[in-house]
Structures are given as C-alpha cells and as structure tokens.
Amino acid sequence: MSNSPNVVVVNMFTPSFQNLNFKYPTKDRVHSATMNMFDYYADNKKKAFFMLDYFQGKFGKEKEMNIMFENGEYATQDQIDKRKKQYEKYIENSNIEKLVISFPAGYLEESVDIKKFEKDMAKHIIPMFLKKCGYADIKNMSYQFALHTDKEHLHFHLSFCEKKPNYKVNGNKLSYRHAGKLTQKELGFFKNEIEHYIEKEKYFTPLLKETNKELEELKSYFNPKDKNFLLKDKEDLLLEDKILKLGELLSETRDNDNRIKFGSIKDKEIIKLTKEIKKYIFSKKNTEFYISHQEFKNSLNLINEYFKEIAKSNHTDIVDDSLIKNKTKYLDNYVLNAIVNHANYMQRQSKISEDEMIHNIIYKNYKNTKTRNRFNILSNYLSSLSKSSKFVNKYKIKEAVKNINNELEDAQREFDKLFKADKEYE
C-alpha cells in the first residue's frame, strides 16, 4: 500500500433554517445552495463513460442523470425534481452534510469495477458510515452522490440529511444533529471503509479465507459428534478430573439439558472451571490444536496489520478491530460450549460398573502415587484392607458395586486406558 493517502475526504455542510450561520445567513441562501447541489451533482458532462458501453452502443442513450440515490441506481430528471421538493421540507430542520471523496490519479479505475463500487457505496458503505455517525435508522436518512471526472483524479460528491429527528442523543432519545462538520473519527472510519473495499481483493480477502480455513481446522478438534475430541488427554489425567467435576456441577444445576449454551450459565464455579479447562487446552504446547491455534492468531494479526496500514495511509489512527474481536469471540464460545456439553454428556452416560469402581480406586491412588504402576496400586489397595472389610478382593468389590449401582453416578469410563496401555504409567 502507498504511504500517501489513497482516500481524501473533505467535509462541509449547509445549515438548516433553524441553524443559520455567517456563511448562510438567510433561508434563501440555504435554499439556493441545496437546489443547486442537485444540478451540480447530476451534470452529465462530469459523468464517467465506459469504453465497453461505447462499443455496445449504449453511449449517450441513458435516460438517467449522473446522480445516484440510496437504491444504487442512477436517477432520472423526474426523480431529481421530486427529491428537490422533498429537500425543501428537510432543510427546515436538518443540516445538509456534504463530502468530497478524492482518489489519486488512476487509483480507483485501476483497482475496482467502478459500477459495482458505486452500488456498494449506496447499499453498504454509506449506510454503515451513517450508523457510525450516530444516526438511528437508515430509512430516515436521505442521501445522494455522484462520480465526477472533470479533474485529473476521480472524485465523488456526497450529501445527506435527516428526514426527521434521527440522531441519537442521551441514550435512546432522537433529535436532529445540530453540530456542523463531522468529527475526524467519523471521517477516518469512512475513509478506512472505502479503502478497505478497494484493497480487500488484493490483501484482505486472501487473509480472511486463510483465517476462516484455520478457524474450521480449530473447530474440527471439537466435533460435537466425537464425544471425546481433544478433552481425552492421555498425558494428564487431572484434566479428566476437572471435566468430571464439571459434569457433576452441571447435573446439579441443570435438569435434562440436551444442549447447553455456555453463555446461559450463571453458576460462578461452573464458569470458572470451564474457563480453566479451556485455558489448559489452549496452553498445551506441541499439540496439533496448539499449533493450529497459533496459525489462527497469526492470521488475525495479519488482518489487524492490514487495517492498521489502511489507517496509516489515510493519516488516521482509527482502526476497526471488530472483525478480529468477533472471530476470537466466536472461537472462544465454540470451545466453551464444546467443553460444557462434553462434560454434560460424560455425566449422563456414565453409570458405575464393576470395573469402573476399580478404575476409580486406581485413579485416586494414582493422583498420590504417580510413580507406581497399575498392578502395584491395585495390589496395595486390596492387601491393605482389614479382614473385616467387604472389599477384600476383586470379586467382593464387584458384588458391592452391584448393590449400589443404582445409587451412584460416576464419569470414569475414560479410565479403560489404565488397563490397555501397559507402559503408560510405569
């Protein structure tokens, strides 16, 4: 991108009858300036004509004038005359904001399809800009613009006003905007959005495609059809303990929820535990997920640098980071939802079985004696029981479990791995 500004916006305004000033001291001056504005914008001598239209025989046959309204279509003379009458009423209370949007010679025509750009200006860019300026309802705004070619560089003339009170003040209260020129923050936003549109196919769209690809890769680690996904961590059974605890808390506070939204949870302990699990997952280095997450963050940083470059080229420090925040929030919510629903699923599916009680014994001993193998842990537990205990051998453990199977719930099904991986804890 160029170091010199690619988009320059100059702002002026014509005051309403209620807001006369030294430059427009009378209503006649305001009326004359407003009506002349339409004729100046619509001058077909300043209109952009396209070579392709000439060879297709369209040259000089248009009924439309060189002025575009909110619908993204060029207006006819009858439509312009009708709008003039509307503005005779609007200018009683609404200022007419006027902007000139200029580009370096050759920049616009070499970078975009101008016809498409004009339509997108009308339907997307200008409405977004007006929202940023504090206007509540775009339907209550009137605007028009025209592309002029009478200078060495292409430039647009844009004007807009309120049809009725539409400027947000003091919360939800609406009033006419009485201030004159727009703020530098508002103009900076407008310049950035215009340049973003022009530059996006070269820089932004490839970055966004790569970021979305990486986001889908991250989501694949939390496939809701895979009930284990990344949370089945073979290296740290303490993570499973947190997941099981989370499942217990969810079962205590929620009744028969098939699908849980993390954002709907109010319990502070559940929220804290879920975030601890998420933090662990995101920090677990040298895993596929960690690597994918780093690639995703790098892509977001590139997008942020892209928007910073746009702001820098327009000599403004206004940087819109809403896309990056939304992408990050989307992934966080996706992962948090996956965690609580995984824990909830584990809690629902796990009624205690004969072997699961043994798994539980092994697990509790494992937390205190990580260096010992499975056989020694189990043997030590069984041999250390008193003769009066019911649990003097594996058979009696099974018998006891049968008697309490309907009373206990335990989510230890995952610990089959303790019997399958011979060398895992040796």
Image (spheres, rainbow, N blue to C red):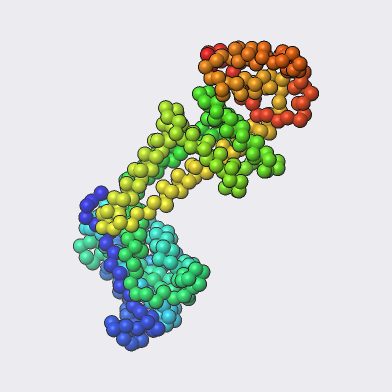
Where is residue 20 shown, x and y percent of the image?
35, 83
Query: Does the image show residue 65?
Result: no
Q: Is 255 above or below relative to 234?
A: below
Q: Nearer the viewer, residue 214 or 161?
A: 214
Q: Is 222 above or below relative to 144?
A: above
**Picture residue at 45% right of the left edge, 44% below the top:** 328
Report which quarter residue 128 is drawn in. bottom left
Where is residue 217 shown, x and y percent of the image?
47, 34
Q: Nearer the viewer, residue 257 or 233?
A: 233
Left or right: residue 315 compared with residue 270: left
**Picture residue at 55% right of the left edge, 19% below the top:** 369
Q: Is 420 above or below relative to 214?
A: above
Q: Is 7 above or below relative to 45?
A: above
Q: Nearer the viewer, residue 126 or 394?
A: 394
Report which quarter residue 120 is drawn in. bottom left
**Picture residue at 68% right of the left edge, 40% below the top:** 252
Report which quarter residue 76 is drawn in. bottom left
**Picture residue at 43% right of the left edge, 63% below the top:** 131
Where is residue 409 shown, x and y percent of the image?
70, 30
Left or right: residue 259 compared with residue 158: right
Query: Does the image show residue 137?
Result: yes
| Mark count | 0
Q: Residue furthest right?
A: 403
Where is residue 313 shown, x and y percent of the image?
26, 54
